[in-house]
Amino acid sequence: MEQYKIYLGGEFIETSQQLNVTNPFTGLQFAQTYLATQADLETAIRKAEAAKEEVKNLPSYKRYEILMQIANEIKKNRDHLAKVLCMESGKPIRYALPEIERAMQTFIVAAEESKRLPKDYISLDWTPSGENKEGIIKHFPIGIVAGIAPFNFPMNLAVHKIAPAIAAGCPIVLKPASSTPLSTLELAKIIDKTELPKGAVSILPMDRKTGNQLVTDERFKLLSFTGSPVVGWEMKKSAGKKKTVLELGGNAAVIITESADLKTAVAKSIVAGFAYSGQICIHAQRFFIHENVFDAFVDQFIGITKNLKQGDPLNKETEISHMIDKKNAERVEGWISEAVQAGAKILTGGRRNGSYVEPSVLTNTSSKMKVCSEEIFGPVVILEKYNTFSEAVEMVNDSAFGLQAGVFTNNAKEIELAFNNIEAGGVIINDTPTFRMDHMPYGGVKDSGQGREGIKYAILDMLEPRILVK
Amino acid sequence: MEQYKIYLGGEFIETSQQLNVTNPFTGLQFAQTYLATQADLETAIRKAEAAKEEVKNLPSYKRYEILMQIANEIKKNRDHLAKVLCMESGKPIRYALPEIERAMQTFIVAAEESKRLPKDYISLDWTPSGENKEGIIKHFPIGIVAGIAPFNFPMNLAVHKIAPAIAAGCPIVLKPASSTPLSTLELAKIIDKTELPKGAVSILPMDRKTGNQLVTDERFKLLSFTGSPVVGWEMKKSAGKKKTVLELGGNAAVIITESADLKTAVAKSIVAGFAYSGQICIHAQRFFIHENVFDAFVDQFIGITKNLKQGDPLNKETEISHMIDKKNAERVEGWISEAVQAGAKILTGGRRNGSYVEPSVLTNTSSKMKVCSEEIFGPVVILEKYNTFSEAVEMVNDSAFGLQAGVFTNNAKEIELAFNNIEAGGVIINDTPTFRMDHMPYGGVKDSGQGREGIKYAILDMLEPRILVK
Amino acid sequence: MEQYKIYLGGEFIETSQQLNVTNPFTGLQFAQTYLATQADLETAIRKAEAAKEEVKNLPSYKRYEILMQIANEIKKNRDHLAKVLCMESGKPIRYALPEIERAMQTFIVAAEESKRLPKDYISLDWTPSGENKEGIIKHFPIGIVAGIAPFNFPMNLAVHKIAPAIAAGCPIVLKPASSTPLSTLELAKIIDKTELPKGAVSILPMDRKTGNQLVTDERFKLLSFTGSPVVGWEMKKSAGKKKTVLELGGNAAVIITESADLKTAVAKSIVAGFAYSGQICIHAQRFFIHENVFDAFVDQFIGITKNLKQGDPLNKETEISHMIDKKNAERVEGWISEAVQAGAKILTGGRRNGSYVEPSVLTNTSSKMKVCSEEIFGPVVILEKYNTFSEAVEMVNDSAFGLQAGVFTNNAKEIELAFNNIEAGGVIINDTPTFRMDHMPYGGVKDSGQGREGIKYAILDMLEPRILVK
Amino acid sequence: MEQYKIYLGGEFIETSQQLNVTNPFTGLQFAQTYLATQADLETAIRKAEAAKEEVKNLPSYKRYEILMQIANEIKKNRDHLAKVLCMESGKPIRYALPEIERAMQTFIVAAEESKRLPKDYISLDWTPSGENKEGIIKHFPIGIVAGIAPFNFPMNLAVHKIAPAIAAGCPIVLKPASSTPLSTLELAKIIDKTELPKGAVSILPMDRKTGNQLVTDERFKLLSFTGSPVVGWEMKKSAGKKKTVLELGGNAAVIITESADLKTAVAKSIVAGFAYSGQICIHAQRFFIHENVFDAFVDQFIGITKNLKQGDPLNKETEISHMIDKKNAERVEGWISEAVQAGAKILTGGRRNGSYVEPSVLTNTSSKMKVCSEEIFGPVVILEKYNTFSEAVEMVNDSAFGLQAGVFTNNAKEIELAFNNIEAGGVIINDTPTFRMDHMPYGGVKDSGQGREGIKYAILDMLEPRILVK
């Protein structure tokens, strides 16, 4: 069984606390690593403090070289990394491979942005008291960053914190999810070979108690958390003086209008609804379909859903596999039951087998049911009918969340209405809310979070502006 | 009869060459002013040279105060200015008044932009040889500007050169059209009352020979010309080392699609086609209408055209009046005849009476006829049918010109197609090519010109960047 | 005695709780106003909610008109406003008048920025999955803003929250300091005359308990607080999901190098040290002077300090007057005593009389003394010697705070060292930390705060970005 | 002897006109290639026209891939490319190698910028007539570019036209200098292996007559010329409607102040004065040295100059070698003689041997002598004394040219004075005018040119903005 040491500021170490990693599909342990102790975390912080000045002062060509070297190594080790990711997370290899490629792209963009950190030069002589003065604005690294990454994109969502931190010149201590620590520990091996000062990056699995220090310790100047809304908002309260970036989830919606290309809409909706069993922050959970095309959409949607290929995620044909663990599968099963009891109708799926949940389609739901109002994080979608476009927008907004929304339409007025009125961080036209380019600003409004990722935007949160007046 | 002195770098002077100003509607002279001699121009240039350093060094709050004072004075004298403009140009008062208001707005925007001249601050350490170096980029006034303004927007198109020059810190010598010098000479009175250094602005009517020195004299660092394509492109050839900005005309087109709101489209098209007798750079000359709505559009269009109210431009009800002079009216009449002989059909109008030309609508034209291929600069439009949107785009592009184009549609794909394929400086959705906000980038592609106006963009052309590396 | 009603979302009301306003110099009550009750605050929030959509949808020309109208009214009422401000705060009229002028300037800049809200347009085709897609990024108003303003710049620091809120399209509930509510209530009268939707602005004095709801109520989406560090950081902890901008204080430092123009340095340092009795967030508290010029600087500094003109703040000659209240004066007196007992030496001043504290200069201090380590917010400065410039930078940084710092030098290397190493939001060359232009980014690092004000920057915090992908 | 075919839009061809390439050091022909005929150029233009649409529509990830592939291939072939460049130009290998590395960097930056073409999104509702409208501004490729590159940086200055053209989406026809066509023809081989549409790039040596069509043919929309001032300004006159970017030369100056680090200043000045025998656009030609350090500077400067290692450019030790040809060497010799006859004094050097000119230092010159007033483009520098800094700035400005200037100083006021008053495209502090980072804006004022290169800036000139209003 493969052993993974954890990455403590330039050293790979073992600790007293073993962490077993299980393949969600087989249910079998296939690797072993470690949890960092509180003392390890203290060491990581001190190493980060010690490296801070050196990291801050790296010229941009050095940052660029380091980040591009990491990107190139990811490219070379693509297949291996994808396999590790697949096995630890149960994510089908057809989705695991693109995630590795996106992680590579995230490093490339960070390399480029490291040469383009925001700088401004402004005139100050707008009133007589500023005469002959000018301002130079430069952004300095904020200090040590605490990163907490989730299990569902164990590689790329961690990279969305690590790569910007290197680009910005901030040391980072990253806690991967305990169920999926391996792909980031593989990344640690790649990072360790670069000229990045030791101490600048630590990748440390931790139990929740130790991990909580990432939230509370005032030596961290920024907490960047990706995970569930409940946990995220609690963290903000105990974060002290540090800044917080919260990338939380939602119950993303899709509107299918009359002018939509139905075939494309269905194909994209299926992927958005069931890829990685819906365990995606921008999983498309709620579909609102114009009444004139509702039946056609449902027919096609159900047809394809029933034929989704289930099985071993390592198999390239596999489209849907087991959820991350049985506990979550049971939760999803429970929410479906609750909905059905309250009047919802299952159009297909609905059953659970161990940690596997069938791709499930519900209708006749109400916005109070958990399958609608909460983030289901499982292979469940609801399909409902609407009449006017304004009504559809209201249905999308009838939610505590607002991460992204998709709208299939060719009508310019509807696009404008959607953009100006849908309460979400992103409105995706003729595609699903699941669409994300790694360099675009990404993040939620309402309870879906605060702050934006997308390299340039993540970097900005890791910097603080200072003005020189002269 | 009112006498207007001309404005020579801070002094109002008379010269040996009188210039009579005639009301195009009555055909009677109503004011008298002067043409600058070559010696006057030499004086203007020397005064500009002498003022250059002081103007360059004005702090931004001073530029702001001066520009806002001018804006406020224009506001106060609005009615008088509009009347002068109306009488010298024959432009109906209903269009003259908004032009004065736009001139005010142009000064306000210039005031604001004078505080926001472009400045950049960049990192240079992208390779080891730039380590520890940074760059500061500041834009310095380019030197003296030569401005040549046309008769058709005698106030605002002159202001689009004067206001940016003041904002940028460049002295300017402006030549108004000989037929319409009065509104800018009124403006000179306003400018003269500000604290702008004397010599920074001269407003000098000139004959063509003297005016040609604005093009050839190397002491001018920028020639900003608004006028006809033929003249403009010739000027570029004899401009020597100086930069040239050419705001020329065109034969702007409009596409009316099936998804257009027909009533709005017709109403806006009438104004775009006949306002100020079509003597507008972005006059809508060619209309391409989807075959399914062609008849309906034509009916409504002709109906309104026939009822346009003709008369004295000082009358608030007047919608159309005489052209700037008889020579131009005859030219327009000639082009119509030529078209009819080649097979075009007149749907309404087509006749001339002195310098008045009826609002005229043609169809059955071909793209080789002058009424299609040249800038008509008269109250003539052609209406033609199209089948597919791509075909309509090709019809728009079948022209040597490309200033702006209008597209009435609610179809998102058509909007995208239009933007990516129509060869024009601006594509205006659900409005006509005649739409212009004074702060937006404005200018043509192909033979319609080079460079952009729109205050911020005009200012940019009056500045040259210099980098400080340290 | 003048009565001031408080401003509840478009209505001027009286409440059951009277608030007496006292002139700090005479110690006499001269006006009376009211504290808002919890029910009033609830009404204000509901009115804000009701106005939200209308405020969000104001076109930019409307926002501009409203903000410029306010600026113009402030200009017209300048003397009256300055007098009210002077009387409620005890701020000498020579400083009160410029504050009113700055408030006017803050509205002008907000007017201009309301037309320039950030908008972005980006390509997304950086990988094949983004092919044919583009992103449009627009910033939408975040929702209702809670503003809490301090007593020391009762007008302009409130305006730095109100003007950006109007520009951004956010309703705001502002709590002025209870000791100085009048100038903002005067402002309310001006705002009320504009076309701003009623409910968009409330200006409500409150007791601390009621005011705490501004911090905790989740209907506020942003808390913008200017005040003391201790209070500010506590607020952040109880702010729930809302964003917080904290403009706190500090113990700002000045470095006087050998290459400084000593006369200018002394003159500016005196103002920075004693204006409004040091009750300024960027009051210059700590002076580090090169040993070769220390004696000369101290001599000149003491000489002028001793001759500062004390008296009635309404007198134009008065340079220093009473502190805001006796409690604060006693606190300052206590800190001086503590310092003296620990070895500090008083060079001049040091005594208190009622709420008046003499302008006081100390030396021989250590960084642990409260007069050094805490924000004194009183007319006290410490002067100490340094040897190398690096040492001086370390002395500046030996503080929990970092708002702004001043450096008097003509040495390019020192300027670079200062900018790259002084931990402060702003480094002001050849001027004091007290320098602020209202449009520049302003705010602290370390314990001096989080976020930046300066209109454009304040507006940015009141907006949330959303991307349209198409 | 090596044969090089020339690159005609995707094909390597031979023509009827042979072109022999000679090694300036040995004087022997070592390679042979061809001149394009007028018919070849016509073919190149037609291929470019044919490829235009495809090149325009390349998604940015394709442009990025192509440009990065070229950069990587340059890296792999570095030594070979440097040797070719060295042999054709006589440039010492110690300077040829960095040029190849810079060409690689230029492609990398172009790759990154191809994803960041300027796009803007602006509000238009600044007056009521713009209500509910917004503007989207996108930059479209301008059309076919004509590039003319000089012999002195035969690789990188050609790359500064080719790489931006690919990034911008414009086809380009590039004419290398007839004396140094080989390195760009090597580049053609690399470009040809990429997926760039055939026809997008042609690299064609031509005689002057054929080459003149690059200037006059209206199918080219931009002429980007790097070369001598006289030729450049003539081209502008015959360029017709096309835009012109002129990167011309100058007689760059350096100021050495009292506060300069003399050793560094001398070392950098030697390289700036004599590298590649001064055949560099930003060759440092005129040195103005504060009288207090003049003697010390001259001593050190002469000392090193005398020991510069002359010889075969392929030898890594060689610091100075033969000029490009005998004609130029004789010209330089003549200018020196003329200066000496008019009173100048030779401090070292001054003699010519075939095409070799000794590194020569003159003093006692006057600004009218050709060695001062013209671009010498040879290994000659003049050293003169100044008294006040303002005087030194005037001496720098006493020239028809203004490309870049160097100032060695540590005085902040002098830096500010230099930036605000030296008439040059770049002012380089504590370095020589010869400093250039490939991504920085680079270009001259006065007779040194028009427009800026530096990838991002070069790209901007190859694009034209169009606004979509909706």
Image (tube, coloured by chain):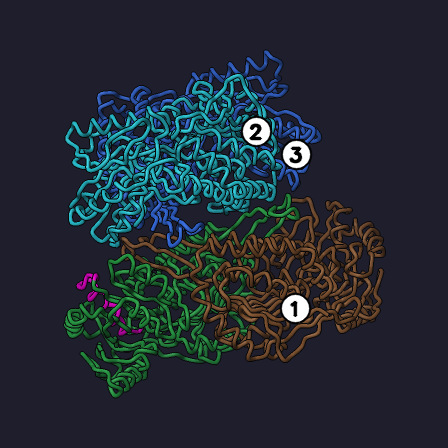
Chain colours: A blue, B brown, C cyan, D green
Residue C36 place in picture, x, y as percent: 51, 21
- Closer to the eye: label 1 or 3: 1
Q: Quick check: do tags 3 and 2 share a chain?
A: yes
- Labels 1 & 3 near each other (Cβ < 8 A): no
Task: Identify the chain of the residue marked 3, using the numbered disc in the image.
Answer: A
Q: Is residue D151 left or right of residue B452?
A: left
Residue D271 drawn in magenta: yes
Q: Is residue B464 above or below residue B105?
A: below
Q: Is residue A443 above or below residue A342?
A: below
Mark 1, Cα crowd under 10 Å, few <14 / some 14-19 / many 20+, is many
Residue D235 place in picture, x, y as percent: 48, 76
- State the CA–CA distance, disc 3 to disc 2: 13 Å
- Give the residue type at disc 1: Pro
Residue B83 place in picture, x, y as percent: 72, 60
Residue B312 drawn in magenta: no
Name the residue rendered at 27%, 35% in the picture.
C380
Q: Which residues are magenta?
A: D259-279
Q: Is residue D56 left or right of residue B354?
A: left
Image mark for residue A257:
3
- State the CA–CA distance, disc 1 to disc 2: 61 Å
- Labels 1 & 2 near each other (Cβ < 8 A): no
Q: Secondary structure at mark 2?
A: strand
Quarter of the image where the C terminus of chain B is located: bottom left
Mark 3, Cα crowd under 10 Å, few <14 / some 14-19 / many 20+, is many
Q: Dividing the picture into quarters, in which one does residue C191 lie? A: top right
- State the CA–CA distance, disc 1 to disc 3: 57 Å
Query: Label 1 belongs to which residue?
Result: B181
Query: Label 2 belongs to which residue?
Result: A253
Q: Secondary structure at mark 3?
A: loop
Q: Is residue C21 visible?
A: yes
Q: Is residue B375 above or below residue C161?
A: below
- Closer to the eye: label 1 or 2: 1
